Amino acid sequence: MKKFLLFPLVIVLSGAVIFGGLMPASAAPKEIRVGHCASLTGMFAAFGEGGAYGMEAAVDDINKKGGVFVKEYGAKLPVKLIVTNSESDPIKTGTLAEELVLRDKVHLFAGPIRPPPMNAPIAAIAERYKIPFVSANPLEPWEAMRMAVTPPWKYTWMFGFAIGTPAPPGDFRHGKPGYTIADTWKSYMDMFGDKTNKRAGVFASDEPDGIGWYNSFPQMLKEWGYHVLGVERKLGFAPLETTDFTPTINEWIKDKVEILWGNAPAPWFGTLWRQAYALGFKPKIVSAARAALFYDDVAAWGGDLPHGIGIEIWWDPTFKDCPGIGDTTPQTLFARWRKDKGKPLNPNIGMGYTAMQILFDAIERAGTLDGEKVNKAIGETDMMTISHRIVFDPETQFSRNPLVFGQWVKTDKPHIWELPIVLSKHDIIPVAADPIFPMPYK
């Protein structure tokens, strides 16, 4: 009988050596790396500055607690946020997102609320590399982009607000007011619409956010009993590079329009509104979705142009019972922003913070940094955050946040402009001022 010498089995697999068929547990990474492609400059810079600050604040808070506990490694790991500047360019965003994967080896992507075209390239990269991505967007334009891809993106999860789509049956928000722009703004119209001639003009920029709005809201106005001028020929719908709105404004004047409502970037609307003032167009109600979200943007319009402009509000430091990490609250997060930046409120600080809270919670529940398992845990999220309760609809991979309505007012304070909440359907969000009607032209 032949004798054989027994040697330990040695296999080399992807750089790891396995002895005797057993691989020792992999060493824990030094940190959890989260990638963020921020619009720090360009058209959407106001979105980017506040969002990045909120995300960094959440990272600081979790790292003060030692990091996120990952069961696979039996330890808490610190979090590192890696921020790159997309310059508000969707094409650059996709390139930067891939660099974050290949060069920086990020485990996850995150972001605050921003226009859908800035999220889509990241979603495509997240899908390619199976890296979970949590960010914020309005539901309808985002869902249209997501479903245009075959198969639809599965590694991207959005929270934010819906334009007009109500929460489905079984959702805790089903049947409740204050979760869509439509019912939020209709609350204002129900108070003051009968004090107008019910003739409305609408506007929107020709890109996904504006398209989603223009395809929905003019029809809603008609259903509410308002005359809407020129929708069948796309009056008020114009490319981002438009600089002369005179023909449209003159039609609004001729039709005696007293209600103006639309959705566009702040510089686009600022140009339209300056020309409207110059031509003597003075509607009684003006709401500028997206355009009037941020202090820096409205202040740039000049003069008294922001006074009385209405806007949906999706985060405010007056939110109650909305916990952050540790002892952080909406109020203390805003106080940190004011101390560090010396600026008025940027509501995206809350949305950026929320995105990170969702990721931290999902990692801990998944007990690993494995993308597929963390992605599954995100889909099972049910938690209170600094912007209220997050529960994702499995069909849309979206969670609705509460919405309220505010109007810009001029003050005698150094920062001049403030955006108090004037209408709220939520017990957790108090009203801070009386609604303004009609627009107070000077």
Image: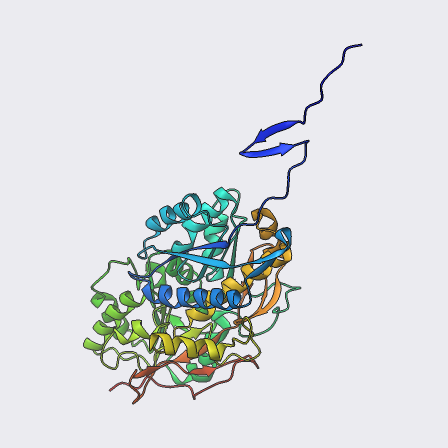
The residue lying toward the viewer, choosing from 168 and 326, is 326
> Disc count in the image?
0
| 198 to 202, vertically: above or below | below
Q: Quadrant of the C terminus?
A: bottom left
What is the residue that sits farthest to the top in this orientation? 1
| 286 to 49, vertically: above or below | below
Q: Quadrant of residue 242?
A: bottom left
Residue drawn 48% across the image and 42% down it: 128
Q: Quadrant of residue 281?
A: bottom left
Residue 293 spot, x, y in % from top left: 37, 72
The residue lying toward the viewer, choosing from 74 and 203, is 74
Q: Quadrant of residue 419?
A: bottom left
Q: Quadrant of the N terminus?
A: top right
Color style of the picture:
rainbow
Residue 140 spot, x, y in % from top left: 48, 59
| 298 to 142, vertically: above or below | below
What is the residue that sits farthest to the right in this orientation? 1
Residue drawn 42% across the image and 76% down it: 336
Residue 347 spot, x, y in % from top left: 42, 72
Residue drawn 50% across the image and 45% down it: 127
The residue lying toward the viewer, choosing from 108 and 16, is 16
Residue 272 lies left or right of residue 226; in this view the side is left
The residue lying toward the viewer, choosing from 255 and 404, is 404
Q: Is residue 19 visible to us here?
A: yes
Residue 332 spot, x, y in % from top left: 47, 79
| 151 to 30, vertically: above or below | above
Q: Is residue 165 visible to us here?
A: no
